[in-house]
Amino acid sequence: MRIGKNQPETKAPPASRQTEKLVGGLDRYLERSADALAARFGEETAAMMRREMLDEYRRLIPEVPYIGGRRNSHSGNLTFTARALALHRVVVRHGGSVEDSGWLLRQMMETEMERIPRVVRHGVGRFRFTRLAKWREEAAARKSQARQYPGDWVVEHVDGDGKTFDFGTDNTECGNVKFLDAQEADELCPYICDLEYVYIKAMGYGVRRTKTLAWGCDRCDFRFSKHGVTSAPWPPEFAERTCGEPKT
């Protein structure tokens, strides 16, 4: 059974119009990152793959679970993950690997971040540590505990310890993990998780994580630091693979 099958009625635009709007967004996203795709597969093949990605995404859109639309900030995460899955399926179809998909997604994320002026990015990053942002995060975490939508995230807010981190979140359920599992694409999930480091590095604050649901851990344990520094190496370190236990 598809996640979110019993989702409530919404006032979204007609499916065809909304679908083409979403597909158009992916098309612009791919246009801005065309060089990365061409560098890996060649210009002629890359142009063919881009068309296939749009077709694949168009087919995927009805399968993306509804979790509250614009009222839920995680809805954008699912939109991105569906785009990433469309890309991944086409990459594999053309002889690529999940590592190729991860590299392309990394290049695309960095391109998107570079479009935003550094002062704006860091301003958004600093806002996350304000009282208003904290209040919003705590309210969203409490709301998630109701589990209104099966395909949604479930989050617990964690107060900072005053030394090693300012605040944290524990995700005990993840919409990306659920969606990719339903689509039999679990191998892509760690690469989606790794993009958090790329994003937070661009925002100018620090994050530490020892567990992710993508690696079968009991939660994703984010710990954020206003004055911290985030590293986002490639290939990914996948430090969460051991779920916080020492490497063997």
Image (cartoon, grey):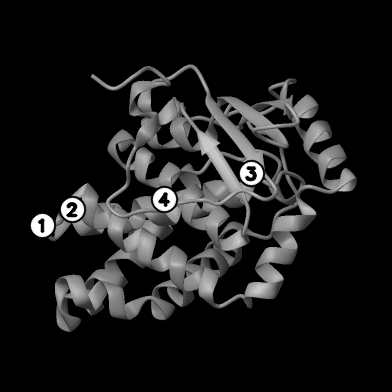
Give the vertical position of 182 relative to 48 (above or below). above
Identify the secondary structure beneath mark 2. Answer: helix
Asked if residue 61 lies left or right of residue 96, the reply is right
Between marks 2 and 3, how big is the CA–CA gap? 27 Å
The amino acid marked with disc number 3 is His
* Residue located 37% across and 39% down the image: 189
Would you say the residues marked 2 and 1 are in contact, meaning their CB atoms lie under 8 Å apart? yes
The amino acid marked with disc number 1 is Gly
Classify the position of the N terminus by image quarter: top left
Q: Is residue 195 something one can see in this rendering?
A: yes
Give the vertical position of 80 relative to 31 (above or below). above
Q: Which mark is residue 92?
A: 2
Between marks 2 and 4, how big is the CA–CA gap? 16 Å
Q: Quadrant of residue 213?
A: top left
Mark 2 crowdedness (10 Å alpha carbons): few <14, some 14-19, many ≥20: few
Give the vertical position of 35 relative to 58 (above or below). below
Lower sequence index among marks 3 and 1: 3
Q: Which mark is residue 74?
A: 3
**Of tags 3 and 4, which is closer to the observer?**
3
Q: Which mark is residue 95?
A: 1
Q: Which mark is residue 60?
A: 4
Tell which of 6 and 99 is nearer to you.
Answer: 99
* Residue located 10% across and 57% down the image: 95
Across and down, in percent, residue 32 comes to 43, 79
Between marks 2 and 1, how big is the CA–CA gap? 5 Å
Identify the secondary structure beneath mark 1. Answer: loop
* Residue located 72% across and 43% down the image: 72
Between marks 1 and 4, how big is the CA–CA gap? 21 Å
